[in-house]
Amino acid sequence: MPQRPSSLPPSRRLPLALLLCGALFLLQQQPAAAAPSGTNSKTAKNSKSPKSAQQAKPAKAKATSKATPKAKAGQTRKQALAAPVETCPPAAKPPSPEALQAAQARASDRGLLWRLSKDGRQAYLYGSIHVGKLDWAIPGPKLAAALQDSDMLALELDPADPAVQQQMSAGLSLRRLEPDAPLRQRLDRHEAKACLPKGSLATIPHPLMQAFTLTLVEARREGLDPAYAQEQVLSGMAHSVQRPVVSLETVELQLDALLPREPAEAMEATSELLDLLEQGKARPVLKRLAEAWERSDLDTLANYEQWCECARNAAERAQLQRLNDARNPHLAERIDALIQAGHRPFAAVGALHMTGPQALPRLLEQRGYQLERLQ
């Protein structure tokens, strides 16, 4: 197995934009996080008996008052060790009926939405996000109306399609790569920090995908979870009412865009993503991106390169262009083909595809479509 070099040319650096691209792949494959830790068994026992806890307080105070300085110091150390520490990212839980009802009452429009029209035909283009919250899973009025007016859902990839899942599994198996020992140790440390079951990351065939998993788990600390990704939610809605769902891209195309072919390059990209996690840079960028999407703030998204810390030189900007702009002509062609075939698709793709010199709205305008921004 080739050893990871100490450095690679800037053109091979991993842009932070990959975080959200990779998130979609992991919707069906990420391991479940362990339940958050916090209280020990003694604390939990006491919490079930308030009366006992109250009765214990005077005795505890009396004992403390007579303790020697040495005993006090030892007691302080024990208390510090026993104190609840929030180390595990919270995992998404099935919402209660009350939580769902409250979310429905708060339903509002988020993301980026356009109506497309050409030659009497109509469709919708939606800029989505690959992580989310419960509130985001409830369509607002404009989004609900657009979905109702469509006859088909078009996603980058349909996460609920068994064929997509099988192709993804096969594609990852073909790209299987074992990390070198130092990288494996780093991944294991992050696995423990994220409270994932020991060895669960190793079941994912590629180290870069393992790093994506860690990034998604880290995003949970900001209340963001792939379980509520727009693709996941929209696909579930469409399938529940037997609305056709199509994939605009192929698994092979997306894997080629995400996973470097050269083992050394892949391990360097994994190391860089772990660097971002260790330096605390991944969460702020994900949070800002999610907040901009929630506000339907196209200007902030369009200026992504100014604040993502992933476009610091010409090589990194070229990499971003490959991951976003370079895929857009194919996406525009597929959306156009669906419309020309007589469908009224609701096309949902990542919001960053709506930005840049080859933004999807611009490419569709070049194909003769009139675009009306709805949100």
Image (cartoon, rainbow, N blue to C red):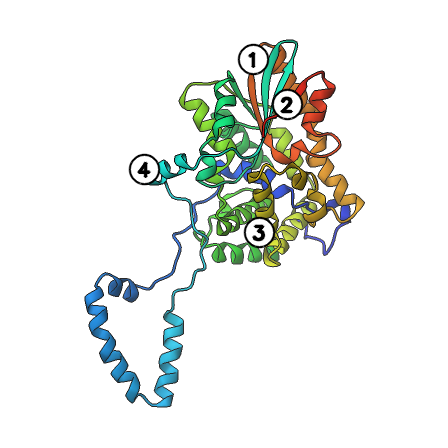
Q: Badge 3 is on which residue?
A: 283
Q: Amino acid at mark 2?
A: Glu
Disc 2 on helix, strand or loop? Answer: strand
Q: Earlier along the polypeptide chain: callout 2 or callout 4?
A: 4
Q: Check disc 4: other Cα within 10 Å, few if <14, some if 14-19, many if 20+.
A: few
Q: Amino acid at mark 3?
A: Arg
At a point 47% along the width and 41% down the height, the residue shown is: 133
At a point 43% along the width and 23% down the height, the residue shown is: 239
Q: Check disc 3: other Cα within 10 Å, few if <14, some if 14-19, many if 20+.
A: many
At a point 51% along the width and 31% down the height, the residue shown is: 231
Q: Which mark is residue 343?
A: 1
Q: Check disc 2: other Cα within 10 Å, few if <14, some if 14-19, many if 20+.
A: some
Left or right side of 183 for 42:
left
Left or right side of 251 for 263:
right
**Height in image: 147 above or below 267?**
above
At a point 68% along the width and 52% down the height, the residue shown is: 4
